[in-house]
Image (spheres, grey):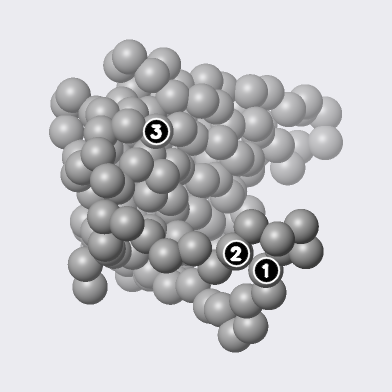
């Protein structure tokens, strides 16, 4: 499927808005493999569902693809590494993840991704967010930058996934 340069609008601009019945989005389950996403999958929910680990690579973005968005969620606590990487060393992600620890005495933290140097979000231990419930969104801001935001779940003294 090719996404047209001029996208259709569901809403014609009325103050009443628009109603969309029966809409569903794609669910991508990498199932323990390395998965490279495509622009045509924009809007998909990408699932970390294999304890041994999963890797997603974001697509190359052309100027007409700005706004491409993916959600990521861990539906199982990992024992391996969950990661999301940009398409290359010159494409970066910026923003941040709030964190929650399952240890009652531990407070939440916020970890930020430097939009001039961060190329991946990697959950390689329980303190970097590979627990059930981690959920965040990446949106293409330009052909070389992605915004990241959401929440990671871990245990103990949490550490940055960036």
Rendered view: 59 above or below 110: below
Nearest to viewer (mark 2 / mark 3): 2
Taking depth in this image into account, of 97 and 129 the one nearest to the observer is 97
User: Which residue is identified by label 2?
Assistant: 11
Q: Along the horizontal axis of the image, is 106 left or right of 78?
A: right
Helix, strand or loop at mark 2? loop
Q: What residue lies at 25% left-to-right and 39% top-to-bottom?
A: 63
User: Which residue is identified by label 3?
Assistant: 141
Please state the horizontal and vertical placement of residue 84, each as a whole percent of the image: 35, 44
Residue 52 visible to an observer of this rendering? no
Rendered view: 161 above or below 85: above
Taking depth in this image into account, of 118 and 41 the one nearest to the observer is 41
**Residue extending furthest right?**
104
Quadrant where the image shows the C terminus: top left
User: Which residue is identified by label 1?
Assistant: 18
Tell which circle, 2 or 3, labels the residue nearer the N-terminal end. Answer: 2
Rendered view: 17 above or below 71: below
Please state the horizontal and vertical placement of residue 46, each as a whole percent of the image: 43, 61
Please state the horizontal and vertical placement of residue 154, each as a whole percent of the image: 61, 40
Q: What residue lies at 49% left-to-right and 54% top-to-bottom?
A: 71
Tell which circle, 1 or 3, labels the residue nearer the N-terminal end. Answer: 1
The answer to which image quadrant residue 17 occupies is bottom right
| Spatial separation of the CA atoms under disc 2 and disc 1 | 5 Å
Quadrant where the image shows the N terminus: bottom left
Q: What residue lies at 51% left-to-right and 25% top-to-bottom?
A: 95
Rendered view: 104 above or below 2: above
Helix, strand or loop at mark 3? loop
Helix, strand or loop at mark 1? loop
Taking depth in this image into account, of 33 and 91 the one nearest to the observer is 91
The answer to whether mark 2 and mark 1 are in CB contact below 8 A is yes
Local crowd at mark 1 within 10 Å, few (<14), some, or many (≥20)?
few
Please state the horizontal and vertical placement of residue 98, each as a whole percent of the image: 65, 31
């Amino acid at each position: 499927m090719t996404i047209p340069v001029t996208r259709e609008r569901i809403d014609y601009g009325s103050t009443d808005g628009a109603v969309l019945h029966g809409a569903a989005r794609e669910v991508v389950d990498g199932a323990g493999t390395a998965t490279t996403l495509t622009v045509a999958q924009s809007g998909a929910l990408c699932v970390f569902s294999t304890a041994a680990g999963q890797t997603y690579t974001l697509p190359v973005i052309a100027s007409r693809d700005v706004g491409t968005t993916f959600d990521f969620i861990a539906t199982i606590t990992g024992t391996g590494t969950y990661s999301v990487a940009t398409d290359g060393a010159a494409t970066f992600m910026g923003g941040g993840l709030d964190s929650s620890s399952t240890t009652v005495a531990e407070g939440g933290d916020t970890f930020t991704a430097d939009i001039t140097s961060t190329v991946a979000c990697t959950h390689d231990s329980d303190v970097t967010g590979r627990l059930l419930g981690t959920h965040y969104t990446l949106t293409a801001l330009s052909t070389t930058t992605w915004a990241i935001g959401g929440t990671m779940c871990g245990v103990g003294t949490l550490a940055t996934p960036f």
